[in-house]
Amino acid sequence: MINNMECLTKTSSVFLITSFFMIYALNADTLRYMKHKQGDDEPKQEWDYVDVRSYAHMFFWLYYTTDPAGYEHVPLVMWLQGGPGGSSTGFGNFAEIGPLDIMLKPRNTTWLSAASLLFVDNPVGAGFSYVDNDDAYTTNVDTIAKDLLVLLKTFFMEKSTQFQSIPFFIFSESYGGKMTAAISDVLYQAITKGDIKCNFKGIAMGDSWISPIDSTLGWGSYLYTNSLIDLSGYLAVNSSLQKVAQAIQMGDWTQATEAWGSAQDVVEQKSNGVNFYNILQWGGSEPTIRGERLIDRMTRRMLGRLHNDPLSDLMNGPIRRKLKIIPEHVVWGGQSDMVFQKQTEDFMKPVTDIVNSLIMNTTLKVVVYSGQLDLIVETTGTEAWVYRLDIAENFRKATRIPVFNPATKLTSGFVQSAKNFSFYWILDAGHMVPSDNGDTALAMLKMVIEMSSTK
């Protein structure tokens, strides 16, 4: 059964006064939970586990929209996190687009104002999802897509049938974009065959790991143009990137992933520790640990920001107590490192062919968006693979129009569209677009929804 949120009772004024004098005796974890209980009524929510395979258990968390019109009149958006191994129910929810931030304060730019939100801890092992043995982890994006299809079939056909006719979108970030391409392909086929009832309308892939080599080869020029490395640094970075390209040309995908990790080391050394996720946020990169294995260092770089201490404390404390169904042996994020490491061979493989097929052979709205300040999936690298798609000629002829920040009324991005494909350039944002530029990210969501409804 789906676990509905328990009604939170309002705290009496006597208790509030007493709590004020006891505040210094309470730890931070308890204080956050108390403030949460004292807030306004929360939006309607449901959560549960789905056994997607033997020994593989996937967790989802559904929020109904806060739009006064009701969930029947707005879309349902599934959010997929990156990594792989990042938690959608944790980082995507509390750090980017959910109703509350990490301090459990209301988020003014929550996407819940325009859609219902479905957060999924995917692949199994991410967040509160877990596996019972080592063989149950996924090792490639194909298995990830099959697992997600099982979850969506269970969601739409058994647990939440009321959403079958609601317009459904998948939005994602980073490696979540690669997973989005894969699941969208199998979901569209399943809908066509009649295996699942779902009003699938479109996808939006943000700073996504679609063509890893294109994203990587742009690092040197991007860093040099932004004065983050000098000429000798530029040459050193490019030399390291050529090793990545050579491994890919030889079809040695595991070596390509390792060479990619080594190239990150060179970038950090030559730039004095640039932040891969936002070049203006210095000090955000994970420091090198003497004697550490390369794969462990890569894992910390990819997942460190997604599993910071405040978020981990929140998820393993107040949120765990609220949900009530998390098994005692499961720690939020406890298996995420293994999730990333199991994808080593598949990590650098592109999925541009899938994206191209979705644009050319389906009725879906396909969106790519990119943060201006992102290094790890920098914009020119994304443009490189976009301009190799079959839609490229029509896309080149299209007019790019400005996107305005609804709060400042200033230009905060651009969008260019051709047929069912759109590209959004988001300014003042890095890899985590909704976290860095929440107003414009919300505006983009509404534009994608509106454009899809007119097709």
Image (cartoon, helix red, strand yellow):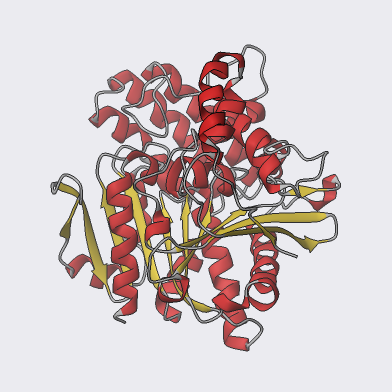
Task: Classify residue 445 by image quadrant.
Answer: bottom left
Q: Position of residue 106 (x, y in %)?
A: 42, 43
Q: Position of residue 287 (x, y in %)?
A: 53, 17
Residue closest to the eye, 378 or 166: 166
Kindly identify the residue that appears in the image at 68 percent across and 71 percent down. Answer: 159
> The C terminus appears in which quarter of the rendering?
bottom left
Residue 100 shows up from this direction: yes
Asked whether, in this view, residue 33 is left or right of residue 3, the answer is left
Q: Is residue 373 above or below residue 323?
A: above
Q: Position of residue 426 (x, y in %)?
A: 27, 48
> The N terminus appears in which quarter of the rendering?
bottom right
Residue 304 shows up from this direction: no
Q: Is residue 32 above or below residue 138?
A: above
Q: Is residue 17 above or below residue 2?
A: above
Kindly identify the residue that appears in the image at 56 percent across and 49 percent down. Answer: 88
Q: Position of residue 56 (x, y in %)?
A: 79, 55
Residue closest to the eye, 109 or 403: 109
Asked whether, in this view, residue 62 is left or right of residue 353, the answer is right
Asked whether, in this view, residue 398 is left or right of residue 243, the answer is left
Q: Is residue 315 above or below residue 56?
A: above
Task: Classify residue 296 by image quadrant.
Answer: top right
Residue closest to the eye, 61 or 252: 61
Residue pushed farthest front?
14
Task: Classify residue 47 by image quadrant.
Answer: bottom right
Q: How many marks?
A: 0
Kindly identify the residue that appears in the image at 63 percent across and 54 percent down. Answer: 5
